[in-house]
Image (cartoon, rainbow, N blue to C red):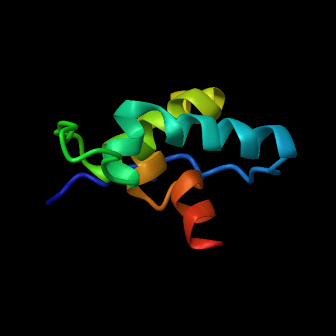
Amino acid sequence: MRKKVPPPPPIPDVHWSENMAWTLLSEVEKDENRLVLLGKRDKKENTSDDSKITVFQRIESVMLRDSYKLNNQSQTGRSGVISQAKRGV
């Protein structure tokens, strides 16, 4: 019989402020994130080995430190806050 796994902590509601929106934009524009999310600016630029989920987790760890510490694997993997914002949820 399989042992029941306790559910991960719920993703907290985030009330977006103007400052958070600018922080998100600045994180997306960083070279290591921009290459994956927005693509190259120049054809000579190297691509990144990161996946989009890795980049979203990296951004969440900067923007939402407290909730990310609770359960860093579940935040983005379970439609985390940044992913919800991207989809307009």
- The reply to whether residue 71 is visible in this rendering is no
Which residue is drawn at the image coordinates 74% and 53% (left, top)? 13
Res 63 quadrant in image:
top right
Give whichever of 37, 53 is nearer the camera. 37
Which residue is drawn at the image coordinates 53% and 27% (left, top)? 69
Q: Quadrant of the C terminus?
A: bottom right
Q: Does residue 22 appear to the left or right of 83 in the view shown?
A: right
Q: Does residue 83 appear to the left or right of 67 in the view shown?
A: left
Res 49 quadrant in image:
top left
Q: Percent x, y for residue 11?
A: 61, 51
Give whichever of 71, 49 is nearer the camera. 49
Q: Percent x, y for residue 21?
A: 74, 46
Q: Does residue 38 appear to the left or right of 36 in the view shown?
A: right
Q: Quadrant of the N terminus?
A: bottom left
Task: Name above or below for residue 33 compared with residue 83.
Answer: above
- The reply to whether residue 80 is visible in this rendering is yes
Q: Percent x, y for residue 75?
A: 48, 47
Q: Does residue 49 appear to the left or right of 60 in the view shown?
A: left
Q: Percent x, y for residue 59?
A: 50, 37
Give whichever of 4, 49 is nearer the camera. 49
Give whichever of 13, 4 is nearer the camera. 13
